[in-house]
Structures are given as structure tokens and as C-alpha cells.
Image (cartoon, rainbow, N blue to C red):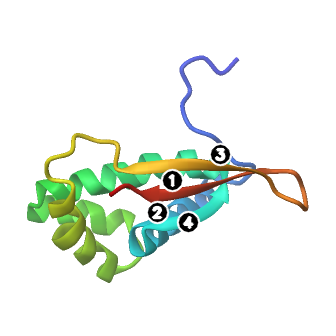
């Protein structure tokens, strides 16, 4: 039984899954939009929203925490310079998931994950 266990395993070992989510969150914050499966989008959304919240706080400690999660220093700079200011008046809900329907090859549910505004 999986009582009170959060998160999806996505059919991958822990290290592979965590690095994949970090890379996807970095790509989302760099391009502000990505197309992926519905399950992955829901997992990446959690990480991306936490990173944007760190960007809103803006201290050196929060910058180092974000740098530990993201894989590109230029994206860390973008989060703290642009995205932190853009979402300063918004309390969460920085991303939107739009469902696209099944993928042709394996019928996996696809979605677009994007930053709002």
C-alpha cells in the first residue's frame, strides 16, 4: 500500500529520475514552455514552482539552493533577475498544464507545461 507516499516513480531508478526532473525544470525555466507526458509535467511543475519561489525571496542562500537544483547557471540568473520580479505579486500558480491527448506511438497522454503571463 502506498499510503501517504507522494511523487511518481516514472519507471526509472531514483538517480536517473531526479536528474531528469532537474534537467526538465531547467529547460522549462529557460524556454518558458515544454511539451512532455502528463505525468512528467505534473512532477516538473512541483520543482519549477519551488524554484520560482526561491527566486522571489532573492537572498544569497536561496540563490545557492536554486543553483543546487538547476543544471545551468544562466537559468539561475534568469530566475532571480526576471522571473522573481515577474511573479512578485503572485502567490503560487506560476505554471499551466494544457492536455493535448494521446501520443501517436504509444498512446501516452501528452501535455504542454508553460509559465503563465
> In the image, is 81 to the left or to the right of 10?
left
Q: Quadrant of residue 1?
A: top right
Using the image, tell me which numbered label, if any, was put on residue 34. 4
Secondary structure beneath label 1: helix
Using the image, tell me which numbered label, if any, was put on residue 64. none
Residue at the outermost left position: 59
Q: CA distance from mark 3 to mark 1?
A: 9 Å
> In the image, is 83 to the left or to the right of 75?
left
Q: CA distance from mark 2 to mark 1?
A: 6 Å
Point out the tag, 1 or 4, that comes first from the N-terminus: 4
Secondary structure beneath label 3: helix
Q: Residues within 10 Å of mark 2 (few under 14, many from 20)?
A: many
Q: Quadrant of residue 93?
A: top left
Q: CA distance from mark 1 to mark 4?
A: 10 Å
Using the image, tell me which numbered label, if any, was put on residue 25. 2
Q: Which residue is mark 1?
A: 44
Using the image, tell me which numbered label, if any, was put on residue 39. 3
Cβ atoms under marks 3 and 2 closer than 8 Å: no
Quadrant of the frame with the C terminus: bottom left
Q: Residues within 10 Å of mark 4 (few under 14, many from 20)?
A: some
Position of 73 relative to 80 (above/below): below
Q: CA distance from mark 4 to mark 3?
A: 13 Å
Cβ atoms under marks 2 and 1 closer than 8 Å: yes
Point out the tag, 4 or 3, that comes first from the N-terminus: 4
Q: Residue at x 16, y 55 (%)?
A: 56
Residue at the outermost bottom position: 74
Secondary structure beneath label 4: strand
Point out the tag, 2 or 1, that comes first from the N-terminus: 2
Residue 70 in picture, x, y percent from top left: 38, 68
Amino acid at each position: 500500500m502506498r499510503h501517504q507516499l507522494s511523487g511518481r516513480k516514472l519507471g526509472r531508478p531514483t538517480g536517473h529520475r531526479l536528474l531528469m526532473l532537474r534537467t526538465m525544470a531547467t529547460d522549462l525555466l529557460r524556454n518558458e514552455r515544454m511539451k512532455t507526458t502528463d505525468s512528467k509535467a505534473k512532477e516538473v511543475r512541483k520543482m519549477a514552482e519551488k524554484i520560482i519561489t526561491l527566486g522571489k525571496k532573492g537572498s544569497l542562500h536561496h540563490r545557492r539552493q536554486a543553483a543546487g537544483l538547476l543544471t545551468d547557471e544562466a537559468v539561475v540568473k534568469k530566475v532571480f533577475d526576471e522571473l522573481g520580479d515577474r511573479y512578485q505579486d503572485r502567490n503560487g500558480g506560476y505554471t499551466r498544464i494544457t492536455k493535448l491527448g494521446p501520443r501517436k506511438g504509444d498512446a501516452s497522454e501528452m501535455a504542454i507545461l508553460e509559465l503563465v503571463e
